[in-house]
Amino acid sequence: MTQRTALVTGGTGGIGTAIIRYLAGQGHRVASNYRDEAKAEQWRKAMAAEGIEVCMVPGDVSDPVSCEAMNKAIEEKCGPVEILVNNAGITRDTTFHKMNYQQWTDVINTNLNACFNVTRPVIEGMRARKWGRIVQISSINGQKGQYGQANYAAAKAGMHGFTISLAQENAKFGITVNTVSPGYVGTDMVMAVPEEVREKIVAQIPVGRLGKPEEIAHAVAFFTGEQASWITGANLAINGGHYMGW
Ligand code: CAA
């Protein structure tokens, strides 16, 4: 296989960590960003103990200036980004009639505007080298909406609009752009949903359980592989059957 440099934003989170493990396991150089240096260093050491050297750089995905610097730092430390996984994300759940502007903009900036901030600095290099893989980590709730998530659902739906436009613009440059839409996976983000609400949600999942981060990472690795060169603009739902759009 060809060794590539992969940037996974939000690598220290549940799904991000699984993606980093999977891509490193395939032999790629892996990079991620952080805002909290102490937390990142602890995580980096834990990954190193597993034999995975992650190139960590400071970077706030909600800030375009920070993302320019982040991209430069990655390029210097481990080479230009050839695989990009826009994975970093947050929630600020509340019903819309109670939502304030900060809760709206925090989620739009970190989940959707980040696609611009992180992808814009890497796209020209991918086009020049005529190879690239970009994956957006969206959500089931971008596809079906969710009570209490007008901000998050809007951002996650927007991510796939970004995917299908970028896919068209960059197809001739050997760059594929796809979306993975996870359902409810057993990460800190989902475990923060009040237990009684979460139990009702799990009861709606035909497979009968929360997803595992590795089950999402497997699909990301599929899209980023060399052989997935004719798959672009797709949105793959991985949700235990919770939502079956077509
Ligand atoms: N459909 C219909 N009614 C619902 C409902 C639903 N899905 N969820 C809640 N309600 C109702 C309640 O039954 C309650 O009704 P009553 O007042 O008649 O008893 C009412 O809504 C409560 O509404 P409030 O406005 O008072 O809401 P709240 O302040 O209690 O909290 C909430 C609402 C924050 C949205 C809470 O229900 C919640 O956390 N829901 C889960 C949201 C969720 O799924 N988040 C996913 C996070 S993980 C993630 O995002 C990862 C991913 O990609 C999947």
Image (spheres, helix red, strand yellow):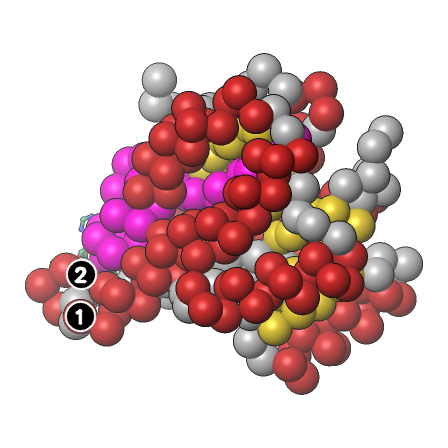
Residue nearest the observer in this picture, 228 or 99 = 228
Q: Quadrant of residue 97?
A: bottom left
Residue 95's tag is: 2
Q: Quadrant of residue 103?
A: bottom left
Please tell me which residue is depicted at 58% across the width and 80% down the height of the picture: 36
Location of the N terminus (image quadrant):
top right
Outermost residue toward the front in this view: 128
Q: Is residue 10 above or below residue 162?
A: below
Element class at badge 2? loop
* Residue extent of the magenta highlight: 131-157
Relative to residue 176, is residue 99 drawn left or right? left
Is the shortest distance between ligand 1 and the CB of mark 2 under 8 Å? yes
Residue type (three-letter) at the residue carrying disc 1: Tyr
Is the shortest distance between ligand 1 and the CB of mark 1 under 8 Å? no
Element class at badge 1? helix
Badge 1 density bin: few <14, some 14–19, many ≥20, Cα 10 Å = few
Task: List x then y, in percent, for residue 41.
Answer: 73, 77
Q: Quadrant of residue 93?
A: bottom left
Task: List x then y, in percent, for residue 222.
Answer: 66, 28
Report the residue marked by disc 1.
101
- Tell me how far mark 2 sits from mark 1, CA to CA: 13 Å
Location of the C terminus (image quadrant):
top left
Ligand 1, what quadrant?
Answer: bottom left
Please tell me which residue is depicted at 28% across the width and 36% down the height of the picture: 144
